[in-house]
Image: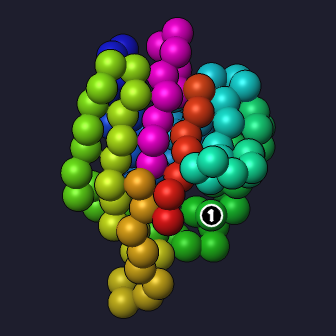
Amino acid sequence: MSPLDLVKGQFDAYNAQDVERFCSFFADDAALAGLNGAVTAQGLQAIHERHAKLFAQHPKNKAILLHRIVLGNVIIDHEDVERAPGGERFQVAAIYTIADGKIVRVDYVR
């Protein structure tokens, strides 16, 4: 799978709130972090737990892709996220690093 296909797949799984399919795009030791900040989830189990909780708390959560930049094994998505219709809304940049056919790191800017 290309880096773009990986990011597209996890994005679609996120919007479908399919935590198993979402996690299938990540490496076992993947990390989620704030840009230039601390790691907030390390490893596939932690990513799974984080997103299972998120999907349970916000069952109508959706992300809309505003812009995507592909630079080799790095993909940057600018997204508009809505927790529920008419609910909390925010924009985020997700910077994906791909290696060996999996997402190995995502740095978020919000």
With 23 as the anchor, is 48 left or right in this view? right
With 31 as the anchor, is 10 left or right in this view? left
Along the viewing direction, whichever of 41 and 8 lies nearer the viewer = 41
Above or below, 28 relative to 100? below
Q: Quadrant of the N terminus?
A: top left
Q: Position of residue 94 (x, y in %)?
A: 45, 48
Q: Position of residue 47 (x, y in %)?
A: 69, 43
Give the quadrant of residue 52: bottom right
State the extent of the magenta-drawn residues as a range: 94-103
Q: Which residue matches tag 1?
A: 54
With 89 as the anchor, is 20 left or right in this view? right
Q: Position of residue 64 (x, y in %)?
A: 29, 61
In the rendered image, residue 25 lying in the magenta stretch gets the answer no
Q: Residue visible at 43% across and 61% down?
A: 92
Q: Residue visible at 53% across and 52% down?
A: 108
Residue farthest front in this picture: 36
Q: Position of residue 86 (x, y in %)?
A: 36, 90
Magenta residues, dominant SS class:
strand
